[in-house]
Structure formats: C-alpha cells, structure tokens
Image (cartoon, rainbow, N blue to C red):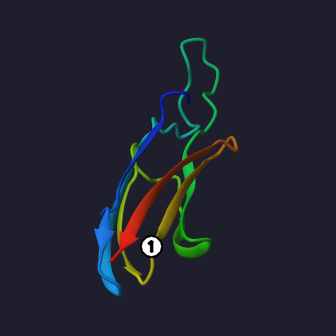
Amino acid sequence: MADSKPRVKVPETAAAGEVIVIKTLISHVMESGQRKDKDGNIIPRKIINKFTCEFNGKPVFSCDIAPAVSANPYFEFKAKVAESGTFKFAWVDDDGTIYADEKQITVK
C-alpha cells in the first residue's frame, strides 16, 4: 500500500541510563483476506504481521502480529538508553513490503 505511513515519537535527548517511552503508529488499511470485491473475488490478505525496533543495531522490541490486529497498529514501549544513537523501526506486511523509519536520540 503506497500510502502506509509510519509515525514514531522518540525523545530527542535523554540522560544516560534514562528509561524513555517510544510510541509508534502506522497508517495501514488491513485486509483480512475474507472479504470479496464487487466481482466476487477474494481480496488478498494484507496485514502488518511483524514489528521490530533496534537501537544501534541491537534488538529492543519485536512482536509477531496476529490477523486480529486492527488497522493502524499502535505500539508503545520503554527503552533504557546509555548512549546516543539511532532507533530503527520496521513493520513487515504480508506481501513482504517493509515500512521503515529511523529516529536519533542524543544522550547527555
């Protein structure tokens, strides 16, 4: 889906060892694979089935997502930061499409 858009909130700065809250939301129209189009053809399933977050190349959070997830999945989680770096986020769709975003954080 061309208009799927990830949105991520990560604080710009934090103190060393601080636990921060990260919020993510991706605009994505989920399709269950059980509906039919106007011609009676089954509309292929299209859901976000995996979400991952890494910080400086190390895993922070990941989950497999079941078909019952709603459209526009929202995740909120905490991470402890000891150094400045980059958070990388990825949402994987059934068709193999990966939607990605990155956010920098400076540790003072």
Q: Who's the residue at 53% across and 60% down the image?
A: 88
Q: Who's the residue at 55% across and 27% down the image?
A: 2
Answer with left or right where residue 36 lies relative to residue 82: right
Q: Nearer the viewer, residue 94 or 56?
A: 56
For the residue marked with disc 1, what is the amino acid? Ser
- In which quadrant is the C terminus drawn? bottom left
Q: Position of residue 1 (x, y in %)?
A: 56, 30
Q: Nearer the viewer, residue 26 or 12?
A: 12
Answer with left or right where residue 99 lies relative to residue 3: right
Q: Position of residue 79 (x, y in %)?
A: 39, 77
Q: Nearer the viewer, residue 84 or 22?
A: 84
Q: Who's the residue at 32% across and 62% down the image?
A: 12
Q: In the displayed image of the protein, which residue is found farthest to the right?
A: 96
Q: Quadrant of residue 6?
A: top left
**Residue under label 1:** 84
Q: Position of residue 75 (x, y in %)?
A: 37, 61
Q: Nearer the viewer, residue 84 or 44?
A: 84
